[in-house]
Structures are given as C-alpha cells and as structure tokens.
Amino acid sequence: MSTPNKIHGYLQQYGHFREHPASTFVGSGASFNAVSPRLTEALHSNVHEYSKPLIIHLRSGSRTVRPCRVVNLNFQLIGFHPYNSKPFVLDIREGNDILLGMPWLVETNRDID
C-alpha cells in the first residue's frame, strides 16, 4: 500500500498591519508565520535580530539558513479576529507581505492539530 503525497494549499487574503493594507497568504504547510522585509521597512518596524540563525526545512527535503529576525505583528484579516504574533522576517513567495502558517491556523481554529 502506498502513502499518498501530502498536499498543502494556501488561501490568498488581504488584511491590515498597523492600518497598512497587506497581502497575505495562509499556508497550511508552513510551521511558522512570516512577514516580508519590505513591509517591516515600510512601516519602520522594530526588528529583533538573534545571533542563532534560523534553519528552515523545505518540502523538497533540503534546508536553508537565514538570519533569525523577528518582529511583533498585530494583524487582522478581513472577517477574522485580531491576531498577535512574533513572525520571522523573511522574503515571502509571490510577493506577499505576510505568511500565516500553522500558528495562525491553530489560533483561529482550535480543532486543527
């Protein structure tokens, strides 16, 4: 019996980050939240940089190492309650400003495991 491949989807959405419009995608395959450097710079966000790097394990089985930078995020997607997180500052695919992964999904829907 073969094991089916995992399929991860994402939902494109728009919200506000400190009253600034932000394009967002919700990625069910992401184990973390992230915000783009472009958005943090545009909003003059206070970025905290840690000495230990961030190691990201990719779906392909490879991994990448990035500086571990974090910012405080108070965010609200249209139709959802406000959300507070400390996401990593990383480039986000397809030019989006914010990636909401499993931490957001679990907070939004407690039935997700």
Image (cartoon, helix red, strand yellow):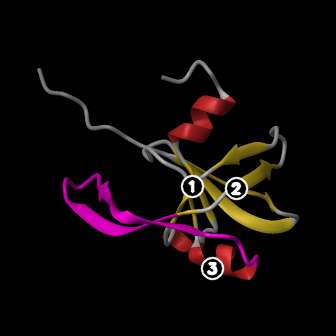
Q: Earlier in the sequence, mark 3 or mark 2?
A: 3
Residue behind mark 3: 38
Which residue, given by chain and number where applicable, does mark 2 sit on? 73
Q: Residue at x 38, y 66 (%)?
A: 51
3 or 1: mark nearer the eye:
1
Which residue is drawn at the image coordinates 29% and 55% (left, top)? 58
Q: Are marks 2 and 1 in contact (CB under 8 Å)?
A: yes
Which corner quadrant of the image does residue 40 belong to?
bottom right
Q: Give the magenta part as a residue range.
A: 43-69
x, y percentage for residue 55? 30, 58
> Which numbered disc covers residue 66?
none
3D distance between C-alphas at marks 3 and 2 = 14 Å
Camera-nearest residue between 25 and 9: 25
What residue is disc 1 on? 87
Residue type, numbered disc 3: Arg
Looking at the image, how many numbered discs can be counted on the residues?
3
Amino acid type indicated by mark 1 = Pro
Residue 82 position within the rendered picture, expressed as x and y whole percent measured from the top left: 81, 43
| In the image, residue 10 above or below residue 97 | above
Q: Which comes sooner in the sequence, label 2 or label 1?
A: 2
Tell me which secondary structure the magenta stretch mostly adopts: strand
Mark before the other along the chain sequence, 3 or 1: 3
- Mark 3, secondary structure of its residue: helix
Q: Which residue is found at the position 34% from the left and 62% from the top?
A: 52
